Image (cartoon, rainbow, N blue to C red):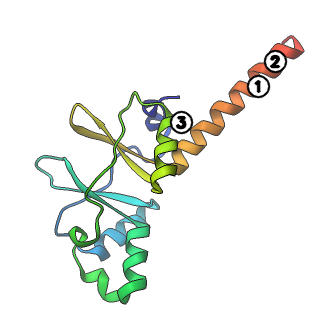
Amino acid sequence: MLVSQILKDKSIQEVLRVAPGSSVGEAAEMLSAKKVGGVIVSDGESGLPAGIVTERDIVRELGKRGAICLEDKVDDIMTCELVTCEPNDRAIRVLQVMTEKRFRHMPVMEDGKLVGLVSIGDVVKARLDELSSQADALKNMIMGY
């Protein structure tokens, strides 16, 4: 299965973004309202991702400094060195990278533009669906259907 297929099946297809300089509290509100785990930090002009802020980033800062961190800028806590994938990448490879590097969200880039964001949950679901389809096909072949 390819990343492009995962993007087509996602319930939220638009990439959620906050502008650089937005507060951590604003990012947390967006994550909560949209029921997602990560938001891309990018300006409206270039659309290129400057970083990503995830639930994990916010919880880490809350644990260190308490609620005062919600007033900080996303720029202060975001991950700047993004590991990305492309629509033609295989889901299993994306899953391997996420597991090895211990993160749960990966921006999808195509021709230098951000076209999506996949979570480890998206990739695992797609992989399980793929394995289930393969198992059904094998069962049908064995049973003669």
Q: Earlier in the sequence, mark 3 or mark 2?
A: 3
Residue 7 falls in image quadrant: top left
* Contact between labelled residues 2 and 1, with CB atoms less than 8 Å apart: yes
Residue 69 falls in image quadrant: bottom left
Quadrant housing the C terminus: top right
Could you say whether the residue bearing mark 1 is in a helix, strand or loop?
helix
Can residue 60 be seen here? yes
Q: Position of residue 29 (x, y in %)?
A: 36, 71
Q: Which mark is residue 140?
A: 2
Can residue 10 be seen here? no
Graded by Cα atoms within 10 Å as few (under 14), some (14 to 19) or many (20 or more), the crowding at tag 2 reads few
Foreground: 10 or 49? 49
- The amino acid pointed to by label 3 is Ile
Q: Which mark is residue 136?
A: 1
Residue drawn at x 89%, y 16% as measured from the top left: 143
Q: Which mark is residue 92?
A: 3
